[in-house]
Image (cartoon, helix red, strand yellow):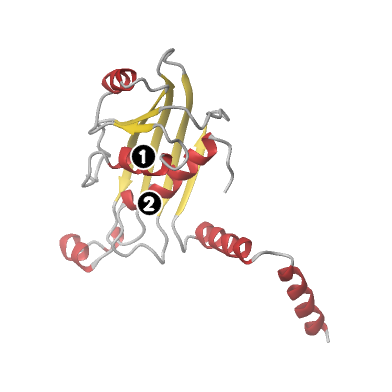
Amino acid sequence: MRSLILLLAFLGLAGCMKVSDMAEGTREQLSDAGFLDHSETRRASPWRLQPDSFIFIAQGYFVPPGSAYPRPNVVAEEAFNGFVEYFPMVRRAAGPAGLEEAMGQARAVGAHYLLYARFASADDRIGTVEEWEDQEALDRVGRDRGVIQLMLIETNTRYLVDSARIRNRGGFLTFYDSKPEDLIGPPLEEYARSLIGLSR
């Protein structure tokens, strides 16, 4: 009898939620538990931008120690892909640039803001048979990790509007044949959403 009451109570509560909410909640729980990819974004400012802001995206030359990633402009490319849906006036640098060079490029195209990014760290763990054959280190098998640093600077005044740090971690169910750069797309899109005040 008790189990029947518990079952009815559970079904009643489940009926109050939309399926999409349940799926999103499940995904968040699996992500926090480490089964799926997980990211954590820490912003220094709650600043919001207008959707018609013109943002120029550039990436620094810095290469994370211990792990070279194949595309040197990968953070700028993924940030552009995440921002273009929410900010129609967005452009990116063709390649890595220093801060002063990126600021000059942003001003030359008339951008209101410069989003300057860098891959602060990247740990590409063994996730395929080929990588195992290359390294053969049991302690290197596992989930990839990475840290991205972002600075949002107003081009006219050089005022640092916001800075953010994104920590990424792969999941146990998704680590096969993945790279640290594969993890950065969703959190950069989420950062773009937070800049215009949209929740998930």
Q: Secondary structure at mark 2?
A: helix
Q: Secondary structure at mark 1?
A: helix
Mark 2 closeness class: few <14, some 14–19, many ≥20 residues within 10 Å: many
Please determine whether, in this image, residue 139 is positioned above or below residue 163: below
Q: Which residue is mark 1?
A: 80
Q: Amino acid at mark 2?
A: Leu
Image position of 31 (left or right of 171): right
Please determine whether, in this image, residue 28 is positioned above or below residue 65: below
Location of residue 179 by image quarter: bottom left
- Residue at 26%, 40% (x, y): give it: 65
- Residue at 27%, 60% (x, y): give it: 126
Q: Position of residue 75 (x, y in %)?
A: 32, 40
Q: Position of residue 108 (x, y in %)?
A: 30, 18
Q: Are marks 2 and 1 in contact (CB under 8 Å)?
A: no
Identify the residue at the far bottom of this view: 1
- Residue at 58%, 30% (x, y): give it: 46
Identify the residue at the far top of this view: 157
Location of residue 165 by image quarter: top left
Gap in Å between the C-alphas at discs 2 and 1? Answer: 15 Å
Q: Position of residue 186 (x, y in %)?
A: 43, 49
Q: Quadrant of the N terminus?
A: bottom right
Q: Which residue is mark 2?
A: 183
Please determine whether, in this image, residue 200 is positioned above or below residue 102: below
N-terminal of the pair, mark 2 or mark 1, is: 1
Q: Amino acid at mark 1?
A: Phe
Q: Position of residue 6 (x, y in %)?
A: 78, 78
